[in-house]
Image (spheres, coloured by chain):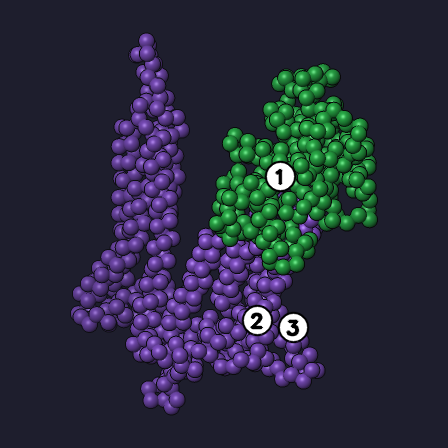
Amino acid sequence: MKRDGDMTLSTPKIKSSGIIVEYDGKRALHGIDLDIYPNEVTALIGPSGCGKSTFLRCINRMNDVIDNCKVSGRLMIDDTDVYDPEIDVVELRARVGMVFQKPNPFPKSIYDNVAYGPRIHGLTENKDDMDRIVKKSLKRAGLWDEVRERLDDKALGLSGGQQQRLCIARAIAVNPEILLMDEPCSALDPIATSIIEELINELRERFTIVIVTHSMQQAARVSQKTGYFHLGNIIEYGETNDIFTRPKNEQTEAYISGRIG
Amino acid sequence: MELIGLMFLALIFLMPLGANIYGRTRIRKLMITSAQTQSEESVKQHSLTAFHGLFMSMCVLLPALVIILCWLAFAPMVISSLLVSEISRLTGETDPRLLSIFVSKLEALYEGVLKAEFVEPEVRQALGYYSALIARANIFLYVVAIFTAIAGFVISARQISPRFAARDKVEVIIKRLMQLASGVAILTTIGIILSLAFEASRFFDVVPISEFLFGTHWSPQIAIREGQAGGSGAFGAIPLFAGTLMITFIAMLLAVPIGLMSAVYLSEYASKRLRNIAKPAIELLAGIPTVVYGFFAALFVAPFLRNNGSVIGLELSSESALAAGLVMGIMIIPFISSLSDDVINSVPQNLRDGASALGATQAETITQVILPAALPGIVSAILLAISRAIGETMIVVMAAGVAANLTANPFESVTTVTVQIVMLLVGDQEFDSAKTLAAFALGLVLFFVTLMLNVLALYIVRKYKEQYD
Ligand SMILES: Nc1ncnc2c1ncn2[C@@H]1O[C@H](COP(=O)(O)OP(=O)(O)OP(=O)(O)O)[C@@H](O)[C@H]1O
Ligand SMILES: [Mg+2]
């Protein structure tokens, strides 16, 4: 928790200014200003439909694939303008990994799932390199010991919690700078959830993590910063401790104490 | 005749309807009386009123229907044996073959197909007996059926009471009806297989099975008169198998890439609007009668190929495997594209998201994630398309000819199994000549091959289908 409390000292990793998102001309986000700092976990909370996923998908331009979706505003990752028409989306997504709500391993072997990203980005020279990356990623995702004997088995044969850790391993195999997680534990049982929460804590050392969650406890446990979204606006953003102990905004207080949402 | 029609109508519609109304009325009345008599604690009705009505109409209709169906199945046998004995009494004839000819004549006479002057006087005498017999038989049938219906009515009416489980009974009856329906389908299939196998075995008594399967000469001409020259016929089916294979192969060569690519385009790239127009447009191809494809092949594609073939120095006959195969390929496209499109669409969206979030381009996502996930479904779509192509006849008759050449040259005329089945069976011939029986043997082979393809398709889908959820 070394950087707690000195928000101003480090420069933000992700800087969102006035991000507006429209689906079929209907606004889902009304201009989001948000600075996300490196090597921290930032939790986004808020009632259903308030635009948390939409915002998350702006960061790696996953909204591009939705036909009726239009994004405007400015979003910087370090010095890169994410919505610069010149930018290479493939490269951007190599820098920004994503883990989804439902585990979505490819119908391939465990090994090939993890190797998929490095392969399409041409990160390795030979098989040994690839083996090393796969092993390292699975280790970081805390899955190595469980699957080392059966790397060639189908990934869909793993349990839900293992599948989700595999998806995390798959995302970190391309060595991204940022990891986006959209309710990564909502399909998992408490034990698998706590394994993943521990994992998030460790991954923070290397990655900047943005996590959407519906669980207040989870946000409090894993994150350093918390942002509260409501109806497409960011209502309050700050240190997780502050948000949960002394929220400045009434709506935030109502939400975290369980009165809305 | 009119009387019988009315009786049938009554049996099928009026009596069940009446029973239904009666059942509902009765249960309502019973409820009212029970409410009056047991005022302190009223009896609860077990099943909804509608079920009591339904139960009664089923009890009226179904047994009577069964009787009519059984009659339809067995009456012809009974009637013709009665006729045989009557005719043999009139003519004094005992030879069963002659008697059966007389019976056929009598039936033809009754139906007005045969003029009276061509029929022996004894047979004409029997006509009166025959028409009386049929009239009596029909009346007898309806009397029995109506009595059954009445019995069903009485018996079921007795059962109606507030606690009677009409709903469960109806459920059981419906379940039985469903079983019966699937039983009919299965039995029909088995019947067809058995008759194919039986007739084919008679063919193999005449022509050895090894000659049929491995012989390379096919010319099923059989002597019309005994001792006619060159009339023995040759039944080596290899040229037919080869022709079928070649045409199917050419068709697949065209249909698989085009069908697959259009499926991928429609499901992954096309906008919703385009898809809504293009998909039905492609499926329209499947609705074109194959005869029309045949026209198209014979009058347009074949001449086109021949003219252009001569430009590049190829000798094409006017009927060629190539023309038939290409047109058949066009016919097959919608099968492959439509089935594959469904399969590709059922690959979960989150796999696409997962791949693109890793930085895969759309083409990479499709070739590396979506198609592998959809592959079992696509393979089975292709296998089904192949069995469709193998069974296709019309296009081949019109575009590839009927000559059984054994050739590997797609520019020559070839023929297929189905075409030869048609050729064997058209025209007048004895039903048990080797030529006719050969059709059954070919049919058996065809059936076996398509069965295997379908089994294989099912197996692949079962074995390799990923369980998402
Ligand atoms: N593909 C889409 N097409 C049209 N509208 C959409 C689409 N995706 C999201 N929306 C709308 O945008 C708004 C924000 O949705 P979003 O999925 O970001 O909410 P969320 O905060 O992630 O909710 P949840 O907690 O339920 O996941 C909602 O009103 C939703 O209806
Ligand atoms: Mg969401």
Query: Which residue is denoted by mark 2 in the rendering?
Result: B250
The part of the image, by quadrant, that contains residue B449 is: bottom left
> Which badge, 3 or 2, comes first in the chain's sequence?
2
Q: Does the Cβ of the disc 1 residue fall within 8 Å of ligand 2?
A: no
Mark 2 vs mark 1: same chain? no
What is the spatial separation of the Cα atoms under label 3 and label 1, in whole angstroms? Answer: 55 Å
Which colour represents chain A?
green
For the residues carrying marks 2 and 1, which lies nearer the camera in this image?
A: 1
The purple-coloured chain is labelled: B
Instruction: Pinpoint residue B173: horizontal percent, then vertical percent.
Output: 34, 38
Q: Which residue is mark 1?
A: A100
Q: Image point 59% across, 42% down: which residue?
A: A140
Q: Which residue is mark 3?
A: B300
Which is more toward the observer, B135 or B25? B25
> What is the three-letter code of the residue carrying label 3?
Phe
Dots 2, 1 in contact, CB < 8 A? no
Give the x, y percent position of residue B445.
40, 69
Q: Secondary structure at mark 3?
A: helix
